Image (tube, helix red, strand yellow):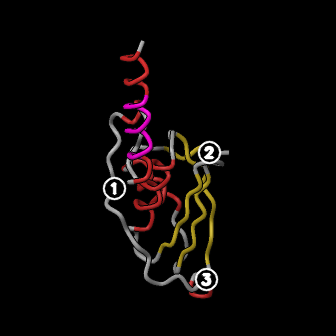
Amino acid sequence: MLAVIAGGLFFGFRRIVASTHGTCCCGDGAGRKKVKRVAVADTDVSHYPYSDELLIGGMSCGGCAQNVTNALNALDGIWATVTYTDHTACIRSKNPIDREVLEAAVRDAGYYVIKP
């Protein structure tokens, strides 16, 4: 009985640690790449005249949302925020938005865009 409780605590702790470090904490994260963390230097909304919103599929935790955020923010002139709870990516851009480029970045990170 104690072994079962100890195992549960161990795996629960691992899951918490993984999610706080931006990695996918779920067992279904196989085949997904951890994307290098990208910090957006210019966060002045007035510099981003274009915007779009994507519905992201395949995310199973906050770490997944961080991976998608990093993949999108790695694109030139993009400032994205991704919310796991509603599976939404809010994208701001300094240039006209090319949805195919955004979708490719999401796909390359191991996730997919849900089309309406």
- Part of the protein shown in magenta: 9-18
Q: In 3D space, how far apart are the residues under numbered discs 3 and 1 (Cα atoms)? A: 24 Å
* Mark-to-mark CA distance, 2 and 3: 26 Å
In the rendered image, the vertical position of residue 69 relative to residue 2, given as above or below:
below
- How far apart, in angstroms, are the residues tagged by discs 1 and 2? 23 Å
Placement of the C terminus among the 4 image quadrants: top right
Q: Is residue 8 above or below residue 89?
A: above
Q: Does residue 77 show up magenta in the picture?
A: no
- Hey, what amino acid is under mark 3? Val
Q: Residues within 10 Å of mark 2 (few under 14, many from 20)?
A: few
The disc label shown at residue 71, or none: none
Q: Which residue is mark 2?
A: 115
Q: Badge 1 is on which residue?
A: 35
Name above or below for residue 110 compared with residue 105.
above
Residue 6 occupies quadrant: top left
- Magenta part mainly helix, strand or loop? helix
Q: Residue, x 42% and y 30% (percent of image)?
A: 9
Answer with the quarter of the image where residue 45 lies: bottom right
Q: Position of residue 21 (x, y in %)?
A: 38, 54
**Residue occupied by mark 3:** 45
Mark with earlier residue (2, 3):
3
